[in-house]
Amino acid sequence: MNTIEITMSPAVSHLLEVTAKTHRIDSLEQYFLDPASSQLDFTFEPEWHDFVDQVSNAWKTNHHMVVRNMPTDNGASTLLAALSLPARFKPYRDQKIVKHFKMSPWTEELSQTIKEGHFHTDLNTAPIPPAATVIHCIKSDPDPKMGVSRVALLSDLINHLEKVGATETLTFLTETQVDMVDERKQSAWSGLIVESDAIRFHPETLRAAARRLNSLPEDLEAYLAQIHESALAVSEPIHLAPGDAIFVSNKRALHYRGACTAQFTMFPHEFQTREIYVLHLQEEPQWSV
């Protein structure tokens, strides 16, 4: 699978920078959560329309893309660039849209640990998970070989499993009722992992359900290993520099982040590591013709 890359033009980058400097991030978040809010001035510029067309074409082709050379600031440009994906933003605590994550050697939190992550979808135990995710790199890993991202399209994953004859794993994904448990949020969900050409999946929420409910198949680990192997086979490494972002479907694809490193400036609490902004969209983007 070849990931489509878009390089944000200096003109569009400038539009975002100017808008970000004239609006506080919390004001922008409140503005975009108001259904009655009007479009910001920069969205009428022809350069912005050209960028939106690029995003639309890439999404319709591949359900994800990498956008290079976005501005880096306090998250405002992350929010503004995501307007190219027409859908409602998902708010979090205190009506925040943009979340900041700094990887850490001192946490086991899946979103911030420097340990290797999993191919997964976000918020997979929610009643209705978000439909799209934006991951905007603010600081890349101190080791340029680490913190690598990947995206595995659901269609490619299914095709690869069929190709290698992993019929039991396919049955697990598409026909087996499973439970998923988020122990941190005390939330749970039951259903099919893959249904109606959409997926919700995370190895750790499946494992948590196995521990708590003892409701999953004995061969769970074998299935998870096969899914990981096939996802690796159909994906490619994505290296994000500061300002680069991944726009990815949270229904048609799994995304992944490899192990990271921490470079200590003063042990144990001061260190440099990968930092990102993340936001979610509630529906799949729909562009007007």
Image (tube, rainbow, N blue to C red):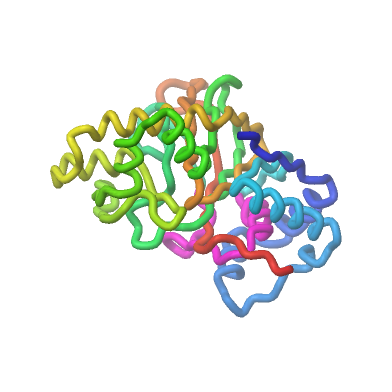
Is 64 in front, or is 9?
Answer: 64
Q: Is residue 209 above or below residue 103?
A: below
Q: Image quarter for residue 208?
A: top left
Picture coordinates of residue 133, whole percent (x, y):
53, 50
Q: Residue at x 49, y 33 (%)?
A: 257
Residue 97 located within the stretch drawn in magenta: yes
Residue 252: tell me if it is visible.
yes
Dividing the image into 4 quarters, which one contains the N terminus? top right
Q: Magenta stretch: give its range.
A: 75-99
Look at the image and tell me whether residue 113 can be seen: no
Position of 140 compared to 220: left or right? right
Q: Residue placed at 71% from the left, 45% from the top?
A: 71
Q: In the figure, is residue 268 to the left or right of 90?
A: left
**Residue 182 pos. (x, y %):** 28, 48
- Residue at image coords 57%, 49%: 134
Is 21 inside the magenta-drawn segment?
Answer: no
On screen, residue 203 versus residue 13, left or right, reads left
> In the displayed structure, would residue 273 be above or below residue 216?
above
Residue reaching furthest bottom? 36
**In the image, residue 70 lies at what x, y percent?**
71, 44
Query: Dividing the image into 4 quarters, which one contains the C terminus?
Result: bottom right
In the image, is 50 to the left or to the right of 92?
right
Of residues 123 and 271, the one nearer the viewer is 123
Instruction: Identify the residue at horizontal 46%, vertical 25% (top origin).
Output: 259
Q: How many marks?
A: 0
List x then y, in percent, for residue 226.
36, 29
